[in-house]
Image: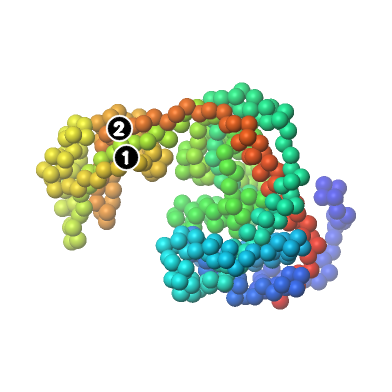
Amino acid sequence: MPQTGLNIPENLQIFGKVDPNVRKPTAIVNGTVITGTDVDQRMALIILANQFKLKPEEEQQLRLTVLRGLIDEALQIQQAKTEDITVKPEELDQAYAKVAENFQKTPAEFGPFLRSVGSSSRSVRKQIEGELAWQRYLRRRVEPSVNVSDDEVQKILAAMNASKGTPEFHLREIYMSAPTPDRVPAVMAAMRQAMEDMKAGKAPFEYYARTLSETTTAPSGGELGWVRGAALPTELATAANEMQVGQLAGPIENSNGFSILYMVDKRKVLEADPRSAKLSLKQIKIAFPAGTTQAQAQVRAAEFATTVKSINGCGSVAKAAADIGAEVVDNDQLTIRDLPTALQDMLVNMQIGQATPPFGSPAEGVSALVLCGRDEAQGGNLPSAGQVQNQVEQQRVNLRAAKILRDLRRDAIIEYR
């Protein structure tokens, strides 16, 4: 099979049996033991952080993904130690406190909280150790050898300037290969099921990217970052041009496989982004008391809608709210992109003093937003030469890091138990 570079006969015979249903729960990586408890506790942390609600088969897939991640973590810590790189306890304490703060806990509260959800402070500290040790290893061994010339930077800046006004997309991708026709049905079925689950809110895009995707972006949740259509395969560029923010598209045939895309955001190169405008808003809101019947809610909502239509500028909001017993909340710190997509599309084109149509739910009541002011986003400017240089250097460091990790996996002695 010349396309693989391997000497594999076309008509092969399998000697022995591999049971795909057998899962090895633990591993020894160059002498470092990864236990089933390690896997369970790291899984619990991921499920907690992402609020996953998983089916049994999805939990099994996540378990395999977590085990692979723990193997990589062990290899990274081991490699860092070859350069006498270690993380001091006080550094771990400081980083641990920041993680606890993300969960609105003190370090003292965080340990019992983690145990209550099936994880542990030890698991968190080990993850922190791996990340810090690997970052320091890359700074010592990789970054000094990565250079970007002034000529390269100027060519990149010239290309950006020439691209001014062209669409740019912030995308996430899930890619699964289907090199032979018999693989296509299984890939398509898995992707369609994943899309149905995402649309139903069963698990976020990042979960399926980590567990299904076969590209190097899988650990980051399929993050492609900001890309222009010209940098994408034709099939993906065509889909991206037709997508709206917050939309899924797929499965899309692409390079001997299929992709699912998620549009995080979109903009035009070096042009002001209207969704970055800062707004001054008043929210007028009514709630439905417990025990409100559907008929009563409809009458109250209709009264609210009539009142909203009568609002003429933000100066009239307080009186309108008082007339119907509504609450008013002010906010002048939001950008348009901070709001749900449906509201973004309205507010981009609204004039000062106008109100959105009513929106809400029986459980949370009904609201409308009144636009009191807008500070337009500034026009996009070319990044500085230093910013471009730093970005390209980081991209090259990441590529080198991925290659080093592949080599470490290839040379590792890994025993599964």
Answer yes or no: is residue 90 visible: yes
Q: Is residue 402 above or below residue 88?
A: above
Whichever of callouts 2 and 1 sits on the residue coming sooner in the sequence is 1
Q: Position of residue 136 (x, y in %)?
A: 67, 56
| Residue at left offset 86%, top offset 48% | 2
Name the kind of residue labelled 1 in the image.
Asp
Residue found at the very far left of the displayed protein: 323
Taking depth in this image into account, of 231 and 319 the one nearest to the observer is 319
- Which residue in the protein does label 2 denote? 373
Q: Position of residue 50 (x, y in %)?
A: 49, 59
Identify which amino acid the numbered label 2 is placed on. Answer: Gly
Towards the viewer: 82 or 72: 82
For the point 25% across and 40% down, the residue is 282
Outermost top residue:
162
Q: Secondary structure at mark 2?
A: strand
Residue placed most toward the observer, 183 or 288: 288
Identify the disc placed on residue 332: 1
Badge 1: few (under 14), some or many (20 or more) residues near its Cα, within 10 Å? some
Name the secondary structure under disc 1.
Answer: strand
Compared across the picture, whether 345 is left or right of 117 comes to left
Q: Is residue 68 visible?
A: no
Q: Is residue 271 left or right of residue 150?
A: left
Residue 227 position within the rendered picture, expressed as x and y whole percent measured from the top left? 59, 37
Q: Is residue 245 above or below residue 61?
A: above
Q: Residue at left 19%, top 61%? A: 290
Horizontal arrangement in the rendering, residue 359 relative to residue 297 (left or right): right
Question: Which residue: 46% across, 74% down?
Answer: 112
Quadrant for residue 163, please give it: top right
Q: Crowding at label 2, few (<14), some or many (≥20) Cα neighbours within 10 Å?
A: some
Q: State if disc 1 and disc 2 touch (CB < 8 Å).
A: yes
In the picture, the disc for residue 293 is: none
